[in-house]
Amino acid sequence: MSNEQLSLTFAALADPTRRAILAHLAKGEASVSELAKPFKMSLPAISKHIKVLERAGLIVRGREAQWRPCQI
């Protein structure tokens, strides 16, 4: 793993919201709206957290018609 990838990973894990999203996904895949429910945040804000996790390689997003499930 490169230093850049390690930096992305540690930066992604530094945020408690992103760690909570990962904990939720450890139980199974979920949509963005399902991941947003426990937080007092807008869907765009949760989407930004998801993108950080995705760039770090910690989660992947699928595509099933209109539904884009996230998973570890």
Image (cartoon, rainbow, N blue to C red):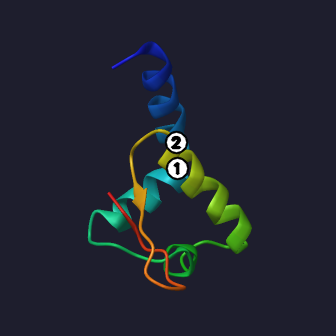
Query: Upstream in the sequence, badge 2 or badge 1?
Result: 1
x, y percent for residue 69: 43, 74
The mark closer to the camera, 2 or 1, is: 2
Quarter placement of the N terminus: top left
Label 1: few (<14), some or many (≥20) within 10 Å?
few
Q: Are marks 2 and 1 in contact (CB under 8 Å)?
A: no
x, y percent for residue 61: 44, 63
Direction from residue 68 to residue 51 in the image, left or right: right
Q: Residue at x 50, y 19 (%)?
A: 4
Residue 39, image quadrant = bottom right
Direction from residue 62 to residue 39 in the image, left or right: right
Query: Which amino acid, mark 2?
Result: Arg
x, y percent for residue 63: 45, 73
Which residue ends up furthest to the left in the rendered image?
Answer: 27
Quarter placement of the C terminus: bottom left
Helix, strand or loop under label 2 = helix
Mark carried by residue 16: 1
Q: Is residue 10 above or below residue 35?
A: above
x, y percent for residue 44: 72, 67
Q: Residue at x 52, y 50 (%)?
A: 16
Q: Which residue is mark 2?
A: 55
Q: Is residue 41 visible?
A: no
